[in-house]
Image (spheres, helix red, strand yellow):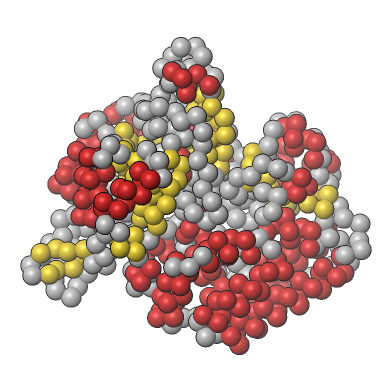
Amino acid sequence: MKCNVCEIGCRIEADTFGRCSMYTLENGTLKERFAHQYSTLFPISIETVPTLHFFPNHKFLQVSTIGCNFRCPGCISEILATGTRTLSATLKKVEPNQVVKKALRENCTGIVFCINDPSVSYFSFLELARMARKSGLKMGFSFNGYLTQEALLELIPHTDFVNIGIKGFSDRPYRTCGALSSGPVLRNLKILVNEGVHVEVAAIHMKNCEDDIKQIARYTAALSRDIPFQVMRFVPFGEAEIRYEPTIRESETLCTDLQELLSHVYLFNSPGSNRLNTLCSSCGRTLITREFFGPMGARNVDMMPCLIEQNRCQCRAKAPFEGSCAPNRYDEHGFFGGYRTTRAFEMLHAILVCIGTEDPVKVSDLWFDIMNSNYLKTFHDLVQLPHKYGEVINYLSEKTDRQARGKELRDHINQKLELITSKSRDLKPPTVYYAMGYPLFALNAERFETNLVEAAGGRCLNKQLTRKGKPGVTLSRDEFMALNPEVIFISGFLSCPASDFIDFCLNNDLDVAAVRHQRIYDHFPLWDFGSPRWILGLMHIANTLHPDVFSFDMKQEADTFYRQFFNTPFEPANANRSFYRV
């Protein structure tokens, strides 16, 4: 039987599951394998979806499942998208009426399906959407646009808003993901706009693919110049190569070009960039100021007061938002909300790789225990502290019967950690600022990276910050200047070339000691957070802060670590931003 949910059009027979592994055939009827079963079910701010022009600041109930009909290199949701075997046991059965009750109980404006694609749980989502709308809730979803026309048209009467992710205008990006062409996506975008659904377009910006993005923008603008257009700066997760990652500066240049075509262009995955703000199309004033809020996410930090009262700018022009602006922002906790849950699983998976956990049954049992306990909260607290990292290794190695290998990893890390902390304890600490992306995005005071600085004998100025974001906050120029760091480190996760960082400082009059003396340092990708490789980042920080005391041979240290825990030599050319792949 041919599946008519998405345009992949799998032939599904009894005991087969199709591309997404989420459907099977029972008595000649297509059935979901895990109907009304969810991997996440908690409130988020709508900007986390991300959706920027629909009921700004409002709280929505996020639902997601597992599986995907695409296989995209660099997928941020790889663990959820490909984890139907290891994660299915973690799914929780929640009937549609119970989901609706939870949304109402949490005072949510609506429900949104995101993180993985709703096409893999289509019938469950359709039933939920019908019930939610009848209960007065708004309903939306984020998807890759590959639903069949028939499936989309059945869903539209129960849909208020959609974020449609477009891989490219040409067919080539879709073939890379295992699909045939961009045609169904462009068709569905047009249908959604013509049917009056609030639509926001998210386009992946890969290096040297600017012309393709511009074609998407032209197609979108032909439907309406006012459709919010989200440029997702490509971050190479999974097995994607880092050479496809554009710099923040390159993505900003693209956004400038796109603004000739569209009224509202936004840049994601670019901490410290001001391209997340909404400006009034009439007078140019800033209506909403936003900042980076984790991969693919944004957070409102300031809003023009008259938006809340009248949904208008001070110049009296109507704001470009559908629905009211809520006066108070909802902030998610810990790893909950948007793609941060997938980051947590990848960080845990990174340890599993290092201790050699390969048994899918043990991994499945582990994920089940984690999702049915309070461990994600515990992990969120422990993973900020280098000296507590061994406790996480112990937990995972005991749960997967890899105690000996876990001890080997823990001892290796602790030996280096104790060596560095003991030798730096009585040294004069230079003042250090830790940025992610551009200079004005400061990592939170309690972040793991700031604690690495202190462990290596530095005084991390981020500890003075009282505001918090995920994973940090945008500073004003005055706040940055008041810190006046002697040394600056740039995160190895969402990074920025040191040369671009310095240029930003010079062009924006950020004249601090670290800039004047060119003491700005980046990291090898993911050597300072998210993986046991952070011990290499600690050595790099120690070398930088106290070169008269520490002289670790980083290539040798990296090769030793990679051979011992990844069973492969260190190959710098293979780097990307995945926590668990090398």
Q: Would you say 207 lies left or right of 523 here?
A: left
Asked whether residue 511 appears in the rendered view, the answer is: yes
Q: Would you say 435 lies left or right of 154 here?
A: right
Query: Picture coordinates of residue 469 (x, y %)?
Result: 60, 45
Residue 412 occupies quadrant: bottom right
**Total number of numbered labels?**
0
* Image vertical order of residue 458 relative to residue 219, above or below: below
- Of residues 134 and 77, which is closer to you in this image? 134
- Which residue is at a point 69% across and 54% down the rendered structure image? 446
- Of residues 114 and 72, which is closer to you in this image? 114
Locate the C terminus by quadrant: bottom right
Query: Picture coordinates of residue 77 (x, y %)?
Result: 42, 58
* Image vertical order of residue 407 relative to residue 43, above or below: below
Query: Picture coordinates of residue 501 (x, y %)?
Result: 68, 43
- Of residues 272 and 520, which is closer to you in this image? 272
Residue reaching furthest to the bottom:
404
- Which residue is at a point 40% across and 57% down the rendered structure image? 40
Locate the N terminus by quadrant: bottom left
Query: Picture coordinates of residue 271 (x, y %)?
Result: 59, 43
Asked whether residue 269 appears in the rendered view, the answer is: no
- Which residue is at a point 75% across and 49% down the rendered structure image? 463
Residue 378 occupies quadrant: bottom right
- Which residue is at a point 8% across and 70% down the rendered structure image? 27
